[in-house]
Amino acid sequence: MTRQSKDPNGTLMMSRRGILLGGATLFAGTLAAALCPTLSLAAVDAGTQGQFMKLSNLLIQHQLSPAVGARIADTASGEYKKLPQMLDAIIAIAEKKNAVQVEDFFADIPDGELKDFAHWVISAWYSGCSSEKRNATVFTYEEALTFKTTSDVVTIPSYGISGPNLWTRPNLPLSAPMPRF
């Protein structure tokens, strides 16, 4: 039996129970939505993600974010069906050469799928997205190496009138005599 109370004017009133249930539902929905990106990162197993970060550190001599690496590895697993084998093959080439930087082994990667994948990984880290296409997956903006390596000289985005981060114009001294009333 449901009971809805009405006020004398004939409009429906909300009960305390309804408010509590609505709030709990809203909280649970927000929590589930916040966990969805975390759940999607678990699609790549820890071994493949570790191998991906190892390859990334061989290809790129910068400090790389493991969280961004997990997003790139997740997208790579969808685009490259033989991802674990490709990672192992490129890492084996680097270990055979005792490589510590990309120049030590990149020329030895055979042309074709492996070299294209190595280029894709480098491009993903520098651009922060999976391709130049309109439907590309964006991994990061702030951690993208193209932005990160120039962040100290990039001007602050601003809608200031006089220039970046200037919200007012300086008062200029008046050179002409002002009229007196």
Image: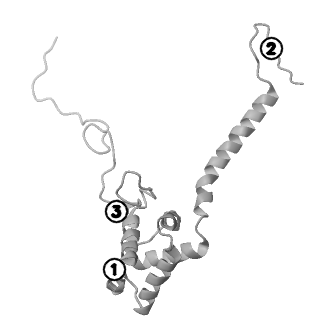
Q: Is residue 80 visible?
A: yes
Q: Earlier in the sequence, mark 1 or mark 3?
A: 1
Residue wearing tag 1: 111
Q: Say which mark, if any, is on residue 23.
A: none
The residues bearing labels 1 and 2 have C-alpha atoms spaced at a distance of: 76 Å
The residues bearing labels 3 and 2 have C-alpha atoms spaced at a distance of: 62 Å
The residues bearing labels 1 and 3 have C-alpha atoms spaced at a distance of: 26 Å
The image quadrant of residue 158 is top left
Residue kind at label 3, given as amino acid type: Thr
Q: In x, y percent, where is residue 142?
A: 42, 57
Residue kind at label 1, given as amino acid type: Asp
Residue wearing tag 3: 146
Q: Residue at 80%, 24% (x, y): give it.
A: 15
Q: Quadrant of the N terminus?
A: top right
Q: Residue at 67%, 43% (x, y): give it.
A: 29
Q: Say which mark, if any, is on residue 6.
A: 2
Looking at the image, residue 180 lies above or below residue 35: above
Numbered disc in front, either 1 or 2: 1
